[in-house]
Amino acid sequence: MSGEGSPTAHYQADPFDGRDLRVAVVAASWHDQVMEGLLAGADRALRDFGVEQVQVVRVPGSFELPVVAAELARGGQDAVVALGVVIRGGTPHFDYVCSAATDGLSRVALDHRVAVGFGLLTCDTEEQALDRAGLAGSQEDKGYEAASAALVTARTLRGLRGGSAG
């Protein structure tokens, strides 16, 4: 189970007033059912935190997440939530896409000094992805977790920069 070792079995940050945060969600288009769950989980988190300024952008696949996340970060977002899923196949494609997307999203966070919620599922099977998608019967809600992590990080960054930490 990928949630092993988390602060609690189903960690979710305590919501705070995030009305003043600007948040973008960039989501891949492959694997419709999994993506529906990830997007719904992110939306629940954003609503729980009271975020009112949300921009949602869809991209073809997970490989495209970093470049669009970078453009959104450049546009003044406090947080970018990146959602996607890559399922292992019989070729090295899985490794290349996972590595490029992960490295790219890390660069976005560091280069733009913006919170990036990492909601990229890298799974061996579709069943594993469905189990993490926040759907009815899923064990985990990675869309919610990625969004709440981005919001908590955005608030922390704002506090470190001398702004209101919420």
Image (cartoon, rainbow, N blue to C red):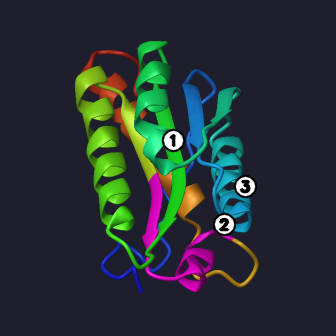
Part of the protein shown in magenta: 119-134
C-alpha gap between disc 1 and disc 2: 16 Å
Task: Give the residue displayed 28% in from the left and 55% down from the top.
Answer: 99
In the image, residue 165 sits, relative to residue 14, either above or below, namely above
Q: Position of residue 108 (x, y in %)?
A: 32, 31
Tell me the amino acid under the disc marked 2.
Val
Q: Position of residue 143 (x, y in %)?
A: 58, 57
Quarter of image, res 154: top left
Left or right placement of residue 165 versus residue 33 in this view: left
Determine crowd level at label 3: few under 14, some 14-19, many 20+ residues with C-alpha closer than 10 A: some
Whether residues under marks 3 and 2 lie with C-beta atoms below 8 angstroms apart, the answer is: no
Magenta region includes residue 121: yes
Tell me the amino acid under the disc marked 3.
Ala
C-alpha gap between disc 3 and disc 2: 10 Å
Tell me the amino acid under the disc marked 1.
Val
In the image, residue 99 sits, relative to residue 156, either above or below, namely below
Left or right placement of residue 32 versus residue 161 in this view: right
